Amino acid sequence: MKVVFLSLLLITSVVQSAVINAVKGKLVLVDLLENPNINPIVDIQRPIQINDEEVVDIGESEDKKEDSVIVWDAEEEDIYDFYDAPNWDFSESDLKELDRDSAIASILTITDAKILEDSPSYSNIEIGNGFSLTLKSTSFTFQNSNGFAGVDDDNDVVSTLNIFEGSSMDAMFSAIGLEINVDSTSSLTLRGPGDSINSQIEMSRVNLYPNAKLTLSSAKKFTEQGDSIFVNGVSFSENPSILEFNGASATAIPEGNAVLFWVILVFFLVIKRNRS
């Protein structure tokens, strides 16, 4: 018993020092609830997240960003047209409307809304490089085979969709360099039967805060799309224990729980070895 107890202390010590070394060394474990700068070491070319509302590309002018902030201003219960100008407050922008035929080159924020986007299938809404859309307390559903997408070009800078503060989004897919951040109170559904997190042209990914929920068309899709699903900078392909499943839906496990899981697992392996 003394051997087992000492082994457990040793295991716990090793886990704790690994976390400390990761913080002081090359790897960084990020507390997503305190610092939303997700995946800081995955790709240094990706945008730097300043706060929960905007993502600023290091190559863009901050003045340009500040002049382009557009917020939701609709009072109707259900909205069917994302591009309808009266739904937006353009007072802080030089724009008067959103162009359906161009990528969105603005920071958009939608709060307390229910949007049932019914545009024709595959007419995806494009978010420009370095720009973002943030949903707060909002339900956003693409009724047809649609979704948000980034821009098809040679630029490694991504477009960003933030799903925050009790929001939910239901879409067929995300594509072309789109980075989706889902906080611990929110959920994302990508119901497409193919590569719903589509990275064929540019890498797309879903970053889940602890307790965030992600639903795909099947549980098998998580394995197929594992390189694009992250919790605290770790992909599902690297460590399947970062998600807890309920059918085709998965919840991101808090970091502390994941560490505890491995401590307990190793502890029982030590007990088994000592008994044999």
Image: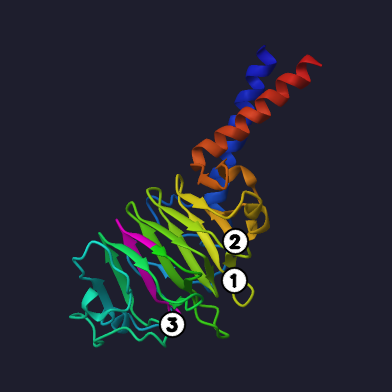
Mark found first going from the N terminus, 3 or 1: 3
Disc 2 residue type (three-letter): Ser
- Asked if the residues shown at circle 3 and circle 1 are in contact, with their CB atoms under 8 angstroms apart, the answer is no
Q: Which residues are magenta?
A: 127-140
Say few, some or many: other residues with alpha carbon within 10 Å of mark 1 (under 14 / 14 to 19 / 20 or more): some
Residue 28 placement, left or right of 48: right
Q: Of residues 178 and 147, which is closer to you in this image?
A: 147
Residue 128, quarter of picture: bottom left
Q: Secondary structure at mark 3?
A: loop
* Residue 181 tag number: none
**Marks 1 and 2 in Cβ contact (< 8 Å):** yes
Q: Residue at x 26, y 87 (%)?
A: 95
Where residue 60 appears, as percent x and y from the top left, is 39, 82
Marked residue nearer the N-terminal end (1 or 2): 1
Report x, y in % for residue 134: 35, 65
Query: Residue 151 location, x and y as percent?
Result: 50, 81
Tag 2 or tag 3, which sits nearer the N-term? Answer: 3
Q: Is residue 269 depicted above or below 124 in this figure?
A: above
Q: Nearer the viewer, mark 3 or mark 2?
A: 2
**Residue shown at the point (55%, 33%) measured from the top left:** 260
When the figure is inspected, residue 41 is found, relative to residue 66, above or below; the finding is above
Q: Quadrant of the C terminus?
A: top right
Does 275 sit above or below residue 97?
A: above
- Disc number placed over residue 203 in the picture, else none: 1
Residue position marked by numbered label 3 in the rendering: 59
Residue for point 33% across, 74% down: 82
- View extreme (top): residue: 1
Image quarter where the N terminus lies is top right
How far separated are the C-alphas under marks 3 and 2? 25 Å
Measure the C-alpha gap from mark 3 to mark 1: 19 Å
